[in-house]
Amino acid sequence: MTAQDSATRPSRIAVAEVASSTTRTAAAEAAGSRRTTTSPGPAGHGSRRAGTVLAALGVTAFSLTFPSTAWGLEGFGPWTFVALRVVLSAVIAGGALLALRVPFPARRHWAGLAVVVAGVVVGFPLLTTLALQTSTTAHAAVVVGLLPLTTAVFSALRTGARPSRMFWAAALAGAAAVIAFTVQQSGGALTTADLYLFGALLICAAGYTEGGRLAREMPGWQVVGWALVLCLPLAVAGAAVALQYESFELTGHSTAGLLYAAIGSQFLGLVVWYRGMAMIGVPKASQLQLAQPLLTLVWSVFLLGEHLTIAAPLTAAAVLVCIAVTQRARG
């Protein structure tokens, strides 16, 4: 061994030790970073708050559905309006899924998506649109008043959720307040449109529940997107047939109503709604819809010229109290 070899060996060993130490330090820091990122803490509260905000945005978007449908019916027949609404929203959803190269949903999700299609994409829009031919938006709002309670019941049956007694008491009180208000606004009269409305109530609650469950396994916007895309062939065929039997006229109101129903309510509203349900749970998110009938009536004043009585602010106060209680109640 030469003197040069002896001199360089300690240097090589030192370099190796430094490198090894640096590697261990980096690994430890990475592990600590991963623990910090995934550890539970205050983020849980922030997630619930964000979920509540998203669900509330969905409710706000849905509150304009009946007024926009009333506008749409000024120029379209009910079957044409619903079919074109689904076609437009499905094209937008399909474009987003294609652009982001989202893989096709797994086979185990197909049954759930079919329920979403039947309940939310087709059933509720069609039945409520048929009802709004002879019913006012105030009377149709009775469906939305009952929907939170019905959705909570479907959720309990489907997912095994067991909300507390306080939750159910507040939900029933809020539903009763909304029903009393909407029935009083409509004069207490029941029409043939009620059959459509109550049918829409049941199938929409099933669609919301199943969509909320699927949104825990895939992003909420993909649940909505795939449900719309799967329904596109049926919607195109339905539009082609409806346009042959129903007259239509493109006015400012009818066009705006169709565009909002397709983009604002059918797509964007459902995206934030399902995301919110996935974050805070179906029963609690559904109770935010107790405010939807009152919002619908407010929009109806400005957009449709309907008149409200003093009962509106009184009912609003009662509903807000019920919402606060249900959001704090533990399931």
Image (cartoon, helix red, strand yellow):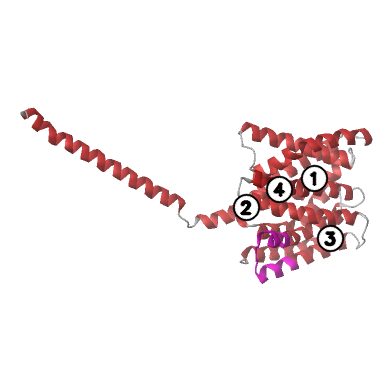
The residue sitting at 69% across, 35% down in the picture is 94
User: Considering the image in quadrants, where does the C terminus appear?
Assistant: bottom right
Q: Earlier in the sequence, mark 1 or mark 2?
A: 1
Marks 4/2: CA distance?
A: 18 Å
Marks 1/4: CA distance?
A: 16 Å
Nearer the observer: mark 3 or 4; the answer is: 4
Q: Earlier in the sequence, mark 2 or mark 3?
A: 3
Q: What residue span does the magenta drawing correspond to?
A: 152-172
Q: Amino acid at mark 2?
A: Ala
Q: Amino acid at mark 3?
A: Thr
Q: Which residue is mark 3?
A: 182
In this image, 292 relative to 167: left or right? right
Nearer the observer: mark 3 or 1; the answer is: 1
Q: Which residue is mark 2?
A: 278
- Residue 165: quadrant of the picture: bottom right
Q: Earlier in the sequence, mark 3 or mark 1?
A: 1
Q: Amino acid at mark 4?
A: Ala
Q: Which residue is mark 4?
A: 111
| Circle 3 Cα neighbour tier, 10 Å, few/some/many (<14 / 14–19 / ≥20) | many
Query: In the orientation shown, which residue stands out farthest toward the front?
Result: 107
In this image, 242 relative to 23: left or right? right
Q: Amino acid at mark 1?
A: Val
The residue sitting at 81% across, 40% down in the picture is 257
